[in-house]
Image: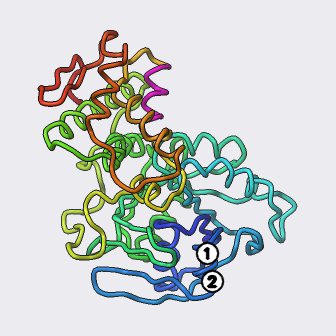
Amino acid sequence: MPRYVIIGAGAVGASLAAQFALSGIDYVLVGRGAQIRHIKDHGLTFRRPDGVRQIKLAAFDLAEPSELREGDILLLTVKSQDAAGALAYWSWRAVAGSHLPAASSLPIVTFQNGLATEAAALRTFANVYGASILTPALFTETGTVAVAGDPVLGIVTVGRFPAGRDALSDQIAADLTKAGYLAEAVSDISRWKAAKLLHNVRNVLELFDGDVALREQISTALVQEATQALHAAGYTLASPSERSIDISHWRIAPDSGVAPGQQSTWQSFTRGASSEVDFLNGEIVLLGRLHGIPTPHNEAVQRLAGQLAEKAEFTKPLPLETIAALLDRSEEPARGGPAIHPGRTVTSNFNSAA
């Protein structure tokens, strides 16, 4: 059995480590800062719908990581904005028993939202596998992670990048299934990552508060722009109907410590951590600029989230009207993008999602 080296001790990484520990799968968890120090000293407080466990984990600080060895599989679970630094740190580390560094001898699995990390990993790692994970996991308190997925933690799709399915992707999916996830291997992981990004572009709205109708208008516009930009970039979007696994009985359990409106972007701002918006809405802005697709709403929320992150202070949501006001001042609607005004119905020249 391989050993999984989980890089990043946030909501995804810590919950993976906990499930591996409970399932008898060989692993180590590597992180930095107060979170990993707490886990090393006190264990992880792990909240699930069926109760709370205090789990002692095989945890290592990034300053003194566990030695890599032949047969290890690296799971990169840091946020998208931290992936470049992590890849630089791990790519050329020595592997015990091998004359080759990690990037040449070990596979890496990228769990990040967005579309940027896989290509970045492929610059150094010879064997890259992308993973799209849907798990309602919450990390806002040091040493504690809550996961509300029921009866299992979440849904994971994994595949070789840029394309392909092989024995290793099948083994990773099988181990994740053993660890309490609904997991499957696919040959077209980019389609699944793109499909998730279509939903992730709405995460940023959890930083805003205001009129329900206005929220829905902006949400719709964000998705319409994302769909147009992704299609222009050549992406086709995977559909849930294509899954080979049955997810019909999976749900987000109520009263499990994870409330609606607390997805990964909100969690990062709540903890005062860095923002992933540049790799979600910012990815759509990038694709739009590359392919001549107007993305004014994604540009507006990216700018406002970036300015909010720059202040390093998030005590209460911003008014949704700040998005509308920014769009009113922008020249983007004049170039074809839909304009949003409080109390008015959004109009758009974008086609419906295919």
Magenta span of residues = 280-289
How far, Cα to Cα, is label 1 from label 2?
6 Å
Left of 262 or right of it: where is 55?
right
Residue at point 42%, 77% (across, down): 178
- Front residue of 89/155: it is 89
Left or right of 110? Residue 37 is right
The residue that mark 1 highlights is: 36
Regarding residue 95, the answer to whether it shows in the image is yes
Question: Is 281 within the magenta?
Answer: yes
Under circle 1, the secondary element is helix
Which color scheme is applied? Answer: rainbow
> With 109 as the anchor, is 95 left or right in this view?
right
The answer to whether mark 1 and mark 2 are in CB contact below 8 A is yes
Magenta residues: mostly which secondary structure?
A: helix
| Picture quadrant where residue 86 is located | bottom right
Q: Nearer the viewer, residue 81 or 332?
A: 332
Residue 213: percent from left, percent from top = 13, 39
At horizontal 70% and vertical 60% (from top left) the residue drawn is 106
Q: Quadrant of the C terminus?
A: top left
Looking at the picture, does residue 41 appear above or below residue 33?
A: below
Q: Which residue is mark 2?
A: 40
**Three-letter code for the amino acid on which mark 2 is drawn:** Lys
| Residue 239 coordinates in the image, percent (x, y) | 27, 44
The residue carrying pointer 1 sits among few (fewer than 14), some (14 to 19) or many (20 or more) residues within 10 Å by Cα, namely many
Residue 261: x and y, percent? Answer: 28, 57
